[in-house]
Amino acid sequence: MKYALLDRGDSHSQQLAKRFHQLAADKGFALSPKSPEIVISIGGDGTLLHAFHTFMDQLYDVAFVGVHTGHLGFYADWRANELDELVEMMATAEPKRIMYPLAQIDLETSEGPARYLALNEFTLKGVDGTLVAQININDEIFEMFRGDGIVISTPTGSTAYNKSVGGAVIHPSIPSLQIAEIASINNRVYRTLGSSVILPQHHHCDIISKKEQRLVLNIDHLNIQRDDIRSIRCKVSTDQICFARYRPFPFWNRVREAFLGYEENRNGLSADQQ
Ligand code: NAP
């Protein structure tokens, strides 16, 4: 098996990375940073976002596995003390390949088009204050937004920034995008829907910002500032990210453990609860 490994860079993650390399060498795995079959991310969900963007051009060829060194993650679901078990399973078991939807963001700029993929979300804010933008859904005007910003999240990103702004948590088997508002201005003059909106796979939305507005775009952890964006189109990508699941860990259990704190014995869960 050919693998690549990214760690968060802190000493605990680096120690675990070293241990993983030793265990992997014992099993005959080959370290292949450029063309791996499996990408191991050691750190947290943030580390997995970095791993995703590093291998974004090889999504058809790689599967991701996340090990967390802090609290339970949504993408990083192996504990630090389970490294031996993980490597043993990688050597002996055939993983279930779980595919998760991604967001595609197409920018129309004065320099031409630019395309991005997001695993968690795309966020748009104004640099100089209130964001003013027209939101179209399927080429029809939907609303004029005024406020701090807009978060457009994937289902797996729905537990991240989206949740902090009151968006719903979406199961990743539903290919969709959620548009959530950040502090919209609502009064007798300005009006937005006020609740988040969930678009199915075959719909798209366009954001047309006020001319020459300086914008901050966040694609997951990446930060981009531009003042030449004419429009932004968001839709569910035809690309997906693949996770190698060596044991089941259903999404709703992850949500419960991450936000409500209840843990349970993971043994005995059937794979179809995934
Ligand atoms: P960060 O600010 O260092 O960490 C943001 C936090 O979000 C970390 O605790 C991270 O978990 C967690 N996280 C990431 N993806 C998640 C997911 N899918 N579900 C639940 N929690 C998740 O930034 P970062 O590590 O570079 O991550 C970038 C992400 O931060 C963005 O994609 C955005 O979702 C999130 N963010 C959230 C807010 C907010 O909630 N107000 C504001 C800005 C950005 P780990 O500790 O396991 O890495």
Image (tube, rainbow, N blue to C red):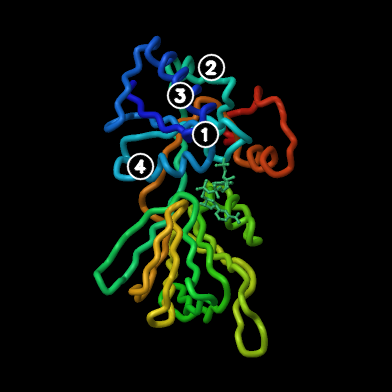
Disc number placed over residue 17 in the picture, else none: 3
Q: Residue at x 35, y 76 (%)?
A: 230
The reply to whether discs 1 and 3 touch (Cβ–Cβ < 8 Å) is: no
Sequence-earlier tag: 4 or 1:
1
Give the CA distance from mark 4 to mark 1.
15 Å
- The x, y position of residue 32, in whole percent, is 30, 26
Disc 4 to disc 3: CB gap under 8 Å: no
Query: Is 149 located above or below residue 33 in the figure?
Result: below
Amino acid type of the residue that numbered disc 1 sits on in the rendered structure: Gly
Image point 27% across, 74% down: which residue? Answer: 110
- What residue does disc 2 label? 85
Q: On the image, numbered disc 4 is attached to which residue? A: 54
Amino acid tagged 4: Thr
Q: Are marks 4 and 1 in contact (CB under 8 Å)?
A: no
Label 1 vs 3, first from the N-terminus: 3
Q: The residue tagged with tag 1: helix, strand or loop? A: strand
**How far separated are the C-alphas under marks 4 and 2?**
26 Å
N-terminal-most mark, 2 or 3: 3
